[in-house]
Image: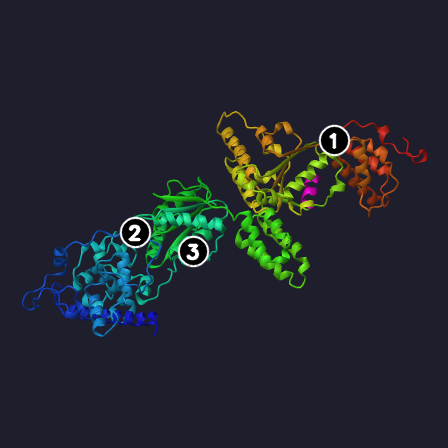
Amino acid sequence: MNDYVAWLEANDQYLGTALADLRERLERAAQRHDTAAAPPAPAAALMESAPTVSASAAPKPSWLARMLKAPRAAAPTQAGDVAAADRPAAQPIIAAVPDADTSVTAAAATSASANGEDANHTPALSVLAGRLGLSRFERDVLLLCIGMELDTRFPALCAQAQHDPSRPYPTFALAFAILDAPSWDALSPERPLRYWRLLDIHQPGAQPLIGAALSADERVVNFVKGMNYLDDRLTPLLTALPPANLPPSQQAIADQMLDGLRHVPVGQPLPVVQLLGSDSVSKQAIAQTIAAAFGAQAYRLSADLLPAAVAEQETLSRLWQRESQLLPLALYLDAAEVERGDATAALVRRFLARAGGLTFVDAREPWTGAATQALSVDVAKPSAFEQRTLWQRLLGDAAGTQPQQLAGHFDFNLGRIEQIAHSALAAVEDAPAALPATLWQAALAHIRPALDQLAQRIEPKAGWDDLKLPDSEKNLLRQIADQVAQRSTVYDDWGFRQRMNRGLSISALFTGESGTGKTMAAEVLARELGLSLYRIDLSAVVSKYIGETEKNLRKLFDAAEDGGAILFFDEADALFGKRSEVKDSHDRYANIEVNYLLQRLESFRGLAILATNMKGALDSAFLRRLRFVINFPFPGTAERHAIWASVFPAQASVGALDLERLARFALTGGSIQGVALNAAFMAAKAGVEIGMPLLLDAVRGEYRKLDKPVNEADFRWLESAGGRP
């Protein structure tokens, strides 16, 4: 027989003896015709001996008189009043609890001792009373109500003891009549029976509290029977955090928080641990590690699930406080998406102030005023070196340079790395040579869901040969590609990351007229680097409501922080415009948005490209922080000739073209692409080749669209004259 089975047997015997004593008390009360008389307690049922006066020698006072003469119970027990009550390392249910003596329950203890039971098998009821601070009388009241659930004889006995067939249930009046050391304090909402919601009080209408029907809470009944589980009213709201294996950088954070928590004086409430940053997965791992060090299990509660009604939130906080006394628990309140001005923010602050126990908060910024004490720490994802080490360990020697490349381009937490590595290895089990490409595509696939909701993904199709730019601009573009590709070597292997707190981002400004190749250049870089390209939709980002633009940008940058993506801000002057003189609140908030953009752009670890045809409209602070500025000039005759020569696909049916004549038209690459497409549709409709007449008609239409002067002589094409107008 193991310890738990032996304890369960001892606990059952304890309850059987205690309930038998209560039945005797109820039977004696039922036999009396005068409720003012109280029977002498059985010798084995009293821990503190009653006065040695027989019932016949001196009548006992009524329960009300005894209650009024009894000494007042101890001060109300609130959460945190009991020594070390807020400590997360809650005792198991079979642990010994001091001061287990009581009147009715002492009978069980005495009987168990007489029967040779192990004194170390402390009953669950005594454990409950010790942790929640019940007095002896309160413990017996609770046991009286628990008897209704465990013994079918109790309803009839309660009705007989109260001389009222319509009252087959316990009441405070009945408890005062049959139990020893009654105290009016037990009825107080600040005393444990009501504060911890151990009893359900059924008080319809104007019925006095003293005569209201009482029943024991189901969770409490099961605890006393030896079943210790999370309250089923909390189960739908909570999610257990999985065990974690932290990398050294995050383990150092956990150790720092543990040191701060262990130095809190005994009896003082533990401070709230505020975990700041955008990576909730890493924060949850740190929280569970700290909780495990105290022998507790952390549970996640989303701030969105906090009830808005004050009474409902109070019930939730009381239930959680009670559970943290009965189980080794820690609370992880996920408020990462809660903004300071949201209605949910007030609910979070109130709940944190009342939760008690070991509590963690997932937040982006400190919740000032949320609790009397708080420990705050910034949590980042594992370092690039730690990520590379894990990639190498999971992939083995066959990975080659993949660990370095993956750690350089992606910023994943450990769980994401393990997931990608295991799935990729399983996918290429029969074709190991495909591992690099499979890993890369799997990593890209993991960043797409978040970014696809915030930006437009562009499939990069253009290559270096498609760019018709001067050599100087092409060389700058190649420098951008080289810096992105070699980030891991320079920042990590060569130690620049440790020497620099800022300026690790790679950002570029593409400036020039519309159609000069800015978007195509972004496609070329994305294709060269094997990264996803996302065009930022300004209509989805910019908002007329104060603070909304900043919130949208935060979501965008947070989603892109995992790496593997190039952010392309087209028409960037709409977002990155100059800060203005503050004349009203709108100017002030607009400047705050620009300041926020400056900070996020500088800390963004990926490649951000800003495109504009109004360079002068950009704030000078942006220009100083940009690593590259590339001017896309209006294409000259030679560039236009090259563009016309390569604008048609090989499959297209194209006739003889006069490229020199076409190159004389002052059009950008984007306009030339549009002209070629329009001419192709006209040719398809007419069932002919794409020839000069159709192209000249399309060029004429493009000139009119751009409000350029049209000289009809320039657009004539005479086949008989060899194409001359």
- What residue is shown with label 1? 634
Q: Which comes before the other along the chain, label 2 or label 3? A: 2
Label 2: element kind: loop
- What residue is shown with label 2? 79
The crowding category of the residue bearing disc 3, from other C-alpha atoms within 10 Å (few below 14, some 14 to 19, many at least 20), is some
The crowding category of the residue bearing disc 1, from other C-alpha atoms within 10 Å (few below 14, some 14 to 19, many at least 20), is some
Q: Does the magenta stretch include residue 564?
A: no
Looking at the rendering, the stretch of residues picked out in magenta corresponds to: 517-527
**Of helix, strand and loop, which mostly describes the magenta segment?**
helix
The quarter of the picture where residue 660 lies is: top right
Q: Residue furthest left?
A: 57
- What residue is shown with label 3? 238
Of the residues shown, which amino acid type is indicated by label 3?
A: Leu
Of the residues shown, which amino acid type is indicated by label 1?
A: Phe
Foreground tag (1 vs 3): 1
The quarter of the picture where residue 161 lies is: bottom left
Q: Which comes before the other along the chain, label 1 or label 3? A: 3
Label 3: element kind: strand
Q: Disc 2 versus disc 1: distance between alpha carbons?
A: 73 Å
Q: Which quadrant, please, contains the C terminus? A: top right
Q: Which residue lies furthest to the front in this view?
A: 494
Vertical side of 203 occupied by 565: above or below: above
Name the spot of residue 218 as percent of width and height, x first: 33, 63
